[in-house]
Amino acid sequence: MKSEELAAQWCRDHPDATLEQAFMAGLGHKMNMNKDSLSARKDKFRSEVLMYRGKYPDDMLKDFFEYWTECGGRKMRFEKERTFEVSKRLVRWSNNDFNKYGKQLNSSQQQSPGNRKESVERLADLASGVLQGIARKFD
């Protein structure tokens, strides 16, 4: 039912009501419509995200959905963005959390034990040098 029809029906049902009462009744209805449309928009976004099931892990899709449907007033986070394409945001989300969701590193990204040991040694040398530099400033 359109808001004009609802207003007309309300006026017929409440012939002795003041203009303020009529306004408040309309405002209350509008607020309920926003809540309903919020859940409807959230459901629509959920179905859009679930289209990518199988391509991305379910845990990642759940985290993505919960983050982007956070409400701040009348709009969800994704609605506040100037542009928003679920497919592109999912690619970016997946790339940012590359190992959190069990995505395997390819062979060029994996560190061998020898490389890891060298990295730890270089880090220890760097930390030692920084500490010596700080100690010299206080001498």
Image: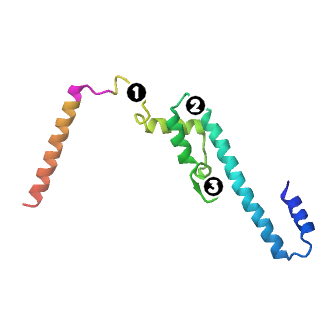
Mark 3 Cα within 10 Å, few/some/many (few <14, many 20+)?
some
Residue marked by disc 1: 104
- Residue position for label 3: 75
Query: Separation of disc 1 and disc 2 at Cα?
Result: 18 Å
Instruction: For the N terminus, give its image quadrant.
Output: bottom right
Q: Quadrant of residue 116?
A: top left
What is the span of residues highlighted in magenta in the rendered image? 110-115
The extreme top residue here reads: 107
Q: Amino acid at mark 3?
A: Lys
- Residue 73: x and y, percent? 61, 60
Mark 1 residue crowding within 10 angstroms, few (<14) / some (14–19) / many (20+): few
Of tags 1 and 2, the one toward the viewer is 2
Place of residue 138 in the rendered image (x, y in percent of width and height, measured from the top left): 10, 61
| Residue 28, position as x, y percentages in the image | 75, 65
Residue at 14%, 41% in the rendered image: 125
First of labels 1, 2 by sequence position: 2
The disc labelled 2 sits on which kind of residue?
Arg
Image quarter hosting the C terminus = bottom left
The answer to whether the residue labelled 2 contacts the one labelled 3, judged by CB atoms less than 8 Å apart, is: no
Q: Secondary structure at mark 3?
A: strand
Q: Marks 3 and 1, how far apart in space?
A: 36 Å
Please tell me which residue is depicted at 20% across the width and 36% down the height of the picture. Answer: 120
- Please tell me which of labels 2 and 3 falls first in the chain: 2
Decide which of 122, 48 is in the foreground and name it.
48
Question: Mark 2 — residue?
Answer: 53
